[in-house]
């Protein structure tokens, strides 16, 4: 078992242990969702509030093990495996962080949930940029559009620019800490821009590739 797999499994088991230990102390309805203003707008039963995240982490554990084995281009995943393994650890820690914040809130602590999520999301986006820049063509990881999957040059170009944009988005998200009333905009606008731009970029790069090959 790889180090990254051991870490995500360990985080999942710790989450289960925390849920079991705190079960008698938690309210019957657990706050589970917050609005952009940081106000609770949804609840779930205690069992799911405590154990949904650990269950998801276990599911992610098996998924992350499975992907490099079933991808038709699995040899390409091995070329950037260290970045993939790093992503596994960071995404597991990100979910555990959300889980911890949720528990603290339901134990009576009060804080701005969106504000505290900002640095974690910024780190996640920045690392996604690192992963994206180094990802080789495959069917599960990266900016998978019909045009990147159809042409290796388009994949490489899209992922180089996409990786840089994810990093910049991470920095912009972090700057949201300076403007608490607009934190949610600092999260959403860069994320949406990167998503739309990279899809459009891959399409137009594909058209250029086809024209250069005399196919259009």
Image (cartoon, helix red, strand yellow):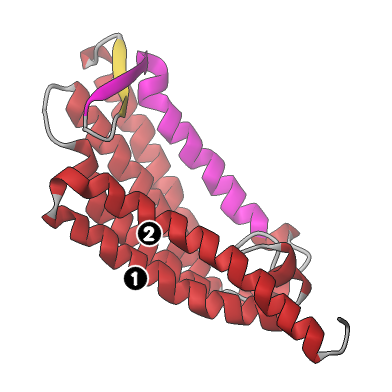
Residue 74 percent location from the top left of the image: 71, 69
Residue denoted by label 2: 190
The residue at the point 38 percent across, 59 percent down is 190
Judge whether 54 appears above or below 204 on screen: above
Q: Is residue 74 magenta?
A: no
The residue at the point 58 percent across, 75 percent down is 158
Q: Residue furthest top?
A: 28
**Quadrant into which the C terminus falls:** bottom right
Residue 105 percent location from the top left of the image: 19, 27
Judge whether 214 appears above or below 56 on screen: below
Residue denoted by label 1: 168
Judge whether 192 appears above or below 209 on screen: above
Q: Residue furthest front?
A: 216
Q: Residue furthest right?
A: 215
- Of the residues under marks 2 and 1, which one precedes in the sequence? 1
> Cα distance, mark 2 to mark 1?
8 Å
């Amino acid at each position: 078992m790889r180090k990254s797999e051991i870490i995500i499994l360990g985080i999942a088991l710790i989450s289960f242990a925390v849920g079991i230990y705190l079960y008698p102390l938690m309210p019957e309805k657990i706050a589970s969702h917050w609005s952009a203003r940081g106000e609770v707008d949804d609840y779930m039963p205690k069992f799911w509030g405590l154990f949904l995240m650990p269950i998801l982490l276990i599911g992610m554990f098996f998924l992350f093990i499975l992907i490099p084995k079933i991808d038709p281009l699995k040899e390409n995943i091995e070329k950037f495996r260290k970045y993939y393994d790093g992503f596994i650890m960071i995404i597991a820690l990100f979910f555990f962080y959300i889980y911890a914040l949720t528990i603290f809130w339901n134990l009576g602590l009060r804080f701005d949930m969106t504000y505290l999520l900002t640095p974690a999301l910024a780190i996640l986006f920045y690392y996604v940029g690192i992963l994206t820049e180094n990802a080789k063509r495959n069917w599960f990881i990266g900016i998978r559009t019909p045009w990147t999957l159809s042409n290796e040059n388009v994949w490489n170009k899209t992922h180089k620019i996409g990786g840089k944009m994810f990093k910049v988005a991470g920095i912009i998200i972090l700057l949201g800490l300076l403007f608490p009333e607009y934190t949610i905009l600092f999260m959403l606008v860069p994320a949406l821009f990167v998503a739309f731009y990279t899809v459009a970029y891959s399409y137009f790069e594909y058209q250029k590739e086809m024209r250069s090959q005399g196919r259009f």
